[in-house]
Image: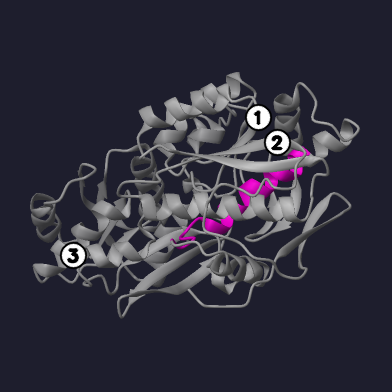
């Protein structure tokens, strides 16, 4: 991460849109608890993420980025008379823990919005709990299309299951085909071996990739499944090598994808592994024993470091003293929290400057109208609660580092 001087983000509201501008500097600390020193009515923004365990590198970035947004919203008094704080809970990437956390957050009446979770499978266990309580949830990372468009989305029968659920990340209905298009047309790969981790995210992503890859003329030469926390991939590697595949597409997260790639390369196979945003972390390369050169992944949005809109966020996060990087979803987490802040502001402004007794339900309604220029670009939501920002990036490992291969959108 580059070191820069501290520049605090200031919010200017004009014509219903939020613009982030530079406005001086201030100190910060690395305690992810939100600064509530300014007094006023306390409004809590919940955070659910894997703060411990194999995916904590992503979860801590989510938590810290929400913390930064809360501190800056308070410093700039975005909602006069309201002081924001965060309540971060650890789901350890487990649906059962996520559901328990959702119940706990609902029970805390000061919680008026929640950022998270990371995993689509965890989100499935939380959505109804939040929706029954009219508590808005904004995920910075969930990509499974069924969360917003229903089980039959692929057939064109899109039905939004839960009104309270939103996300700032685009979906696998776009990410999978975007990756397939790159694999076939840019990387010139024609024979793919598909592997998934049996989880909601991984299975859905592989299905989306497969549909587009075969449509383009590519051939699926084999398909297999692995388990989360699996360490030995010799069985699936034998199948991959005998299949004649010129690329492996993996649906899942980096704790399994990295070792799979490293063990595959160690056998002498020169077959690149490709996957989605769940693979996009530096730990993937480490877990592949630095044998991942040539591997590919897609990730939502453009790299934060390349965006003019994110320069202040990058600088502020570095200056904030956080001991963990913002990782793949930091910018989206900041924007998710800021969306909640803006929805709270709209509701409070409409109620004479006070938090109404039915704030949760009104905030759900207000979220559908939120629109601002955020860290990751324009932030707003469509009729399903999906992000209107559909940008994606393909990364390739070069010299044991992720490098941008292509940034764009998928139009079909």
Query: SS of the residue at dot 2?
Result: strand
**What are the residue bounds of the magenta stretch?**
324-344
* Residue 68 quadrant: bottom right
**Disc 3 versus disc 2: nearer the observer:** 2
Residue 46 percent across, percent down from the top left: 57, 37
Look at the numbered disc 3 and give the secondary structure of its residue: helix
In the image, taking residue 384 as reference, residue 120 lies left or right, namely left
Query: For the residues marked 3 and 2, what is the alpha-carbon distance in whole angstroms?
Result: 49 Å
In the rendered view, tell whether residue 6 sits above or below residue 205.
Answer: below
Crowdedness of circle 2 by 10 Å Cα count: few (<14), some, many (20+)? some
Q: Give the overall secondary structure of the magenta segment.
A: helix
Left or right of 165, for residue 374 = right
Q: Position of residue 287 (x, y in %)?
A: 23, 62
Q: Pointer 3: residues within 10 angstroms few (<14), some, or many (20+)?
A: many
Instruction: Say which residue label 1 marks.
Output: 110
Q: Position of residue 37 (x, y in %)?
A: 70, 47
Q: Residue 42 shows which numbered tag?
A: 2
Q: Are marks 2 and 1 in contact (CB under 8 Å)?
A: yes
Pick whichever of labels 1 and 3 is earlier in the sequence: 1
Label 2, label 1: how far apart the Cα atoms are = 7 Å
Residue assigned mark 3: 262
């Amino acid at each position: 991460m580059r070191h820069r001087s501290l520049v605090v983000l200031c919010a200017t509201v004009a014509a219903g849109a939020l613009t982030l501008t530079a406005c001086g500097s201030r100190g910060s600390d690395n305690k992810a608890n939100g600064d509530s020193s300014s007094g006023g009515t306390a409004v809590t923004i919940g955070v659910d993420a894997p703060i411990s365990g194999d995916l904590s590198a992503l979860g801590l970035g989510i938590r810290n980025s929400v913390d930064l947004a809360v501190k800056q919203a308070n410093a700039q008094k975005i909602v006069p008379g309201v002081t924001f704080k965060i309540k971060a809970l650890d789901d350890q990437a487990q649906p059962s823990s996520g559901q328990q956390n959702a119940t706990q957050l609902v029970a805390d009446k000061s919680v008026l919005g929640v950022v998270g979770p990371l995993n689509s499978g965890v989100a499935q266990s939380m959505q109804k709990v939040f929706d029954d309580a009219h508590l808005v949830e904004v995920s910075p990372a969930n990509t499974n299309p069924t969360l917003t468009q229903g089980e039959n989305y692929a057939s064109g029968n899109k039905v939004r299951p839960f009104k309270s659920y939103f996300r700032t990340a685009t979906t696998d209905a776009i990410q999978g085909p975007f990756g397939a298009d790159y694999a076939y047309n840019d990387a010139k790969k024609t024979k793919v071996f598909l592997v998934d981790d049996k989880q909601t995210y991984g299975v859905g992503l592989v299905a989306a990739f497969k549909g587009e890859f075969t449509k383009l003329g590519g051939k699926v030469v084999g398909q297999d499944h692995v388990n989360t926390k699996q360490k030995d991939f010799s069985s699936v590697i034998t199948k991959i090598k005998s299949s004649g595949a010129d690329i492996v597409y993996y649906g899942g997260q980096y704790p399994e994808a990295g070792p799979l790639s490293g063990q595959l390369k160690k056998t002498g196979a020169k077959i690149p592994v490709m996957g989605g945003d769940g693979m996009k972390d530096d730990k993937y390369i480490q877990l592949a024993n630095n044998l991942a050169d040539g591997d590919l992944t897609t990730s939502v949005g453009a790299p934060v470091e390349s965006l003019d809109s994110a320069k202040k966020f990058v600088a502020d996060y570095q200056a904030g003293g956080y001991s963990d990087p913002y990782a793949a979803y930091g910018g989206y987490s900041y924007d998710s929290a800021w969306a909640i802040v803006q929805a709270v502001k709209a509701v409070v402004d409409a109620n004479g400057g006070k938090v109404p007794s039915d704030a949760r339900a009104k905030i759900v309604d207000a979220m559908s109208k939120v629109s601002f220029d955020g860290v990751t670009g324009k932030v707003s939501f469509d009729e399903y609660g999906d992000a209107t920002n559909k940008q994606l990036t393909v990364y390739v490992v070069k010299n044991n580092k992720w490098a941008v291969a292509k940034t764009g959108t998928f139009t079909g």
